[in-house]
């Protein structure tokens, strides 16, 4: 039986550490603060941001939720961000994506002070990460490394194959794995004979946004599989394709009308030595790493 890497338990442990650090900083009169900008009313974004703000409260961080209407212009958003850059009570700035079409997201993210860029999306932080300098690393990739390390999965010398090359997940996770001395291969939609490449992986990180894309024959027996994908399925046909015979899932699916599946087919987990489930694997780490980054930004900004 493969080992299940329990992201929720790892996230809880990190939460505790962050809360203790916040307490220590509090004794020095410092309260790390996160400004979260949520534009408009995208339901998924509202859920994510609410949960980020809630976690701030839980861990003792200050948070400020800013909710402009979805008619806001790029210029108005730039002004808002510059204001946050100048505020001393704000250590981290989070701009929830996606933004409305009329807003130039790249221009905006480039305007965030790199010292407050707790999502790690600014080119300065991407460059620092590439150069192996201290940087605010993107939260999901940082969470993947935490899962591997805290689960004592050896990274150094392992062949890590990263499926996906986005700026948010694929590229940064590949870079972090490289810094941990893995031999890293990055795959994407143009990769030739993908199964032959993924089958070489001691550590396979799947981040492509395709439900159940990784099938059993793509996994080397005993590999560690990190499933970053979050895909909602809502049809009976899809459900049967992934979870046929799983009574617990079926009950949840019936109740909610949908369920989540990763980028890895559940049958492929059976090939692994260890894997992160969906939900409950990588997902819980993302928010907690945002908190950790905010505390880190607060300390770095004060030269601590
Ligand atoms: P993007 O859509 O930005 O990138 C997808 C990547 O996958 C691209 O590099 C693309 O290749 C590659 N890809 C797509 N289809 C294929 C294919 N058939 N074969 C090989 N490669 C393919 O996605 P993200 O990186 O933003 O997200 C990936 C997944 O991770 C999503 O399911 C998302 O929901 C999830 N996610 C989860 C988070 C969490 O908290 N757990 C946080 C962020 C994302 P190419 O570049 O050639 O087009």
Image (cartoon, rainbow, N blue to C red):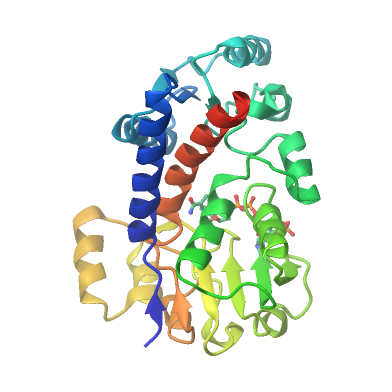
Looking at the rendered image, the quarter that the C terminus falls into is top right
In the depicted structure, whether residue 152 falls above or below residue 98 = below
**Which residue is at the far front?**
28
* Residue 234, image x, y percentages: 36, 58
Viewer-proximal residue among 79 and 155: 155
Indicate the position of residue 46 as horizontal and vertical percent values: 39, 32
Instruction: Please identify the quadrant where the N terminus is shown.
Output: bottom left
* Image vertical order of residue 120 relative to residue 14, above or below: above
Quick one: 194 or 184, which is closer to the camera? 184
The x, y position of residue 70, in whole percent, is 51, 19
* Ligand 1 located in image quadrant: bottom right
Q: Residue at x 52, y 19 (%)?
A: 90
Left of 145 or right of it: where is 236? left
Please give left or right for residue 154 compared with residue 45 in the image: right
Q: In the picture, residue 114 is in which quadrant?
A: top right
Q: How many marks?
A: 0
The percent position of residue 5, horizontal first and vertical second, equals 40, 70
- Work out whether residue 75 can be spotted: yes
Q: Is residue 234 visible?
A: no
Above or below residue 109? Residue 193 is below
- In the rendered image, the vertical position of residue 186 relative to residue 218, given as above or below: above
Please identify the quarter of the rendering in which residue 13 is found.
bottom left
Q: Which residue does the image show at 45% across and 70% down from the upper left?
A: 151
> What residue is drawn where x is 58% and y is 26%?
100
Query: Which residue is rendered at x = 33% and y = 29% of the image?
Result: 60
185 relative position to 160: left or right? right
Residue 121 figure quarter: top right
Out of 180 and 273, give the one closest to the viewer: 180
């Amino acid at each position: 039986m493969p080992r299940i890497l329990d992201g929720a338990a790892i996230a809880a442990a990190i939460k505790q550490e962050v809360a203790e650090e916040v307490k220590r900083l509090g004794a020095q009169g410092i309260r790390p603060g996160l400004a979260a900008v949520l534009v408009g009313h995208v339901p998924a974004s509202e859920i994510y941001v609410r949960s980020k703000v809630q976690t701030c409260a839980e861990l003792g961080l200050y948070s400020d939720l800013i909710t402009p209407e979805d008619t806001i212009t790029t210029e108005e958003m730039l002004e808002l961000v510059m204001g946050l850059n100048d505020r001393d009570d704000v250590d981290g700035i989070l701009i929830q994506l996606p933004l409305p079409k009329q807003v130039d997201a790249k221009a905006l993210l480039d305007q965030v002070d790199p010292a407050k860029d707790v999502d790690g999306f600014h080119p300065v932080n991407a460059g620092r990460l590439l150069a192996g300098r201290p940087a605010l690393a993107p939260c999901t990739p940082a969470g993947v490394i935490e899962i591997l390390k805290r689960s004592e999965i050896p990274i150094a010398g392992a062949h890590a194959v990263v499926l996906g090359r986005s700026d948010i997940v694929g590229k940064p996770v590949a870079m972090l794995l490289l810094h941990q001395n893995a031999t890293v291969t990055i795959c994407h939609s143009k990769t030739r004979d993908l199964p032959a490449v993924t089958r070489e992986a001691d550590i396979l990180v799947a981040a492509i946004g395709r439900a159940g894309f990784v099938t059993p024959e793509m996994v080397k027996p005993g590999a560690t599989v990190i499933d970053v994908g979050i895909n909602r399925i809502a049809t009976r046909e899809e459900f049967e394709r992934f979870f046929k015979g799983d009574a617990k899932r079926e009950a949840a699916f019936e109740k909610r009308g949908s369920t989540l599946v990763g980028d890895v087919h559940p049958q492929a987990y059976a090939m692994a030595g260890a894997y992160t489930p969906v939900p409950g694997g990588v997902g819980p780490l993302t928010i907690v790493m945002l908190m950790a980054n905010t505390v880190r930004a607060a300390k770095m900004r004060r030269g601590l």
